[in-house]
Amino acid sequence: MRVLITGGNGLIGQVVAQHLLQRGFEVHLTDLTDETQVPHTTYARCDVTRYDEVVEQARGCDAVVHMAALRGPMHDIGPIVYHINTVGTFNVFEAAAQVGIRRVVQASSINAIGCAWNSLDFVPAYFPIDEDHPSSTSDPYSLSKHHSESIADYYWRRARITSIALRLPGVYLGEAHKTEELKHWRTAMCRFLDDFRALPQDEQHHALGAVRARTLKLRAAKGLEYPATSWPVSASLDREELLWRAYMIDRFNLWASVDVRDAARAVEQALMADYEGSHALFINEALNSLNYDAEALVRLFFPDITQRRRPFVGGESLVSIERARALIGFDPLYSLHGAEDAANR
């Protein structure tokens, strides 16, 4: 199978290219540079916002893996983020229809439901979150991902192009990411949460109310959008900063993550699985990023959300991957957590 990969120089695209080559695919890699060091069968420069260029690169390919996009609202002003991500997606699907390609895999995001980058609060309808969860985006990047999934639905109706939109959370770089510093931080966060949960209820409520107000103020001011001048959290391990990180970042990210190698495996599975239609699938680790009691996280940070589609089990992810398992056979092989983590929590 000859596969066109857009955005092949990116964080995920280059790992996908190497993985598919190792699995025997022909990889036609494209990106905005004239040359690349990423392994490939053939390479060409391509701007996905230019339809004629996409059509030219799609000819002779059997499938498309669409990875070209801006990866968050910090990278440019909202109109540019939205334009590149949605027009690029539309062009990929239209080019596929034009040249007779009938399978597309695109990189979507957990943010298609509206969470990590929201300028408003994120209020889930239920837990664990699954693909039936409604979308309530309030930033240009997340809106672009939500609409890119709608483009895939449109091309199933219009041209019978089967597709998977991989809803990826924070993607980390395999073993290179598992540093002692990160392990120390995770241990500190888990201990902090244990201690915080042991506080009297009124102290918990006061602290959470203050950090919530601070969080919603920053988000309402578009503090996570271009031109954001700095990342709003530090590496400090003091109690105030740990609570700020837990609420401002981790809560809105749902403690979800995935190893880039599992993201590449999911691409291959989405290319090869037997299915029809257009589907969005959450792709993440089976455990939350702290391997912390999932029900405890929800009760602490989402106390008003009482609906459960099923009970949580231990430190599992707050985002279900059951549909990805069923449709394409996805089951993550890699984790932030070693056997010692599970034994110690």
Image (spheres, rainbow, N blue to C red):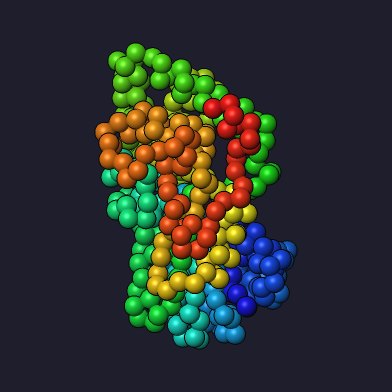
Image spot of residue 12 (x, y percent) = 59, 57
In the rendered image, residue 183, in percent from the top left (x then y), is placed at 62, 31
The number of numbered discs placed on residues in the rendered structure image is: 0
Q: Is residue 159 visible?
A: yes
120 lies left or right of 185: left
Can you tell which quarter of the image residue 264 is in?
bottom right
Location of residue 326 in the rendering, given as x and y in whole percent from the top left corner:
46, 60
Q: Seen in the image, is 44 located left or right of residue 83?
A: right
- Quarter holding the C terminus? top right
Which residue is depicted at the point 49% across and 86% down?
Answer: 100
Q: Residue at x 60, y 75 (%)?
A: 3
Where does residue 300 sit, x and y in percent of width and height?
A: 36, 28
Q: Is residue 109 visible?
A: no
Residue 176's place in the image compared with 315, above or below, is below
Instruction: Give the side of residue 236 with respect to residue 144, left or right.
Output: right
**Closest to the observer: 25 or 64?**
25
The N terminus lies in quadrant: bottom right
For residue 205, side relative to residue 100 (left or right): left
Which of 78 and 146 lies nearest the eye of the viewer? 146
Q: Residue at x 48, y 25 (%)?
A: 242
Work out whether 182 lies above or below 20: above
Residue at position x 31%, y 21% in the image: 205
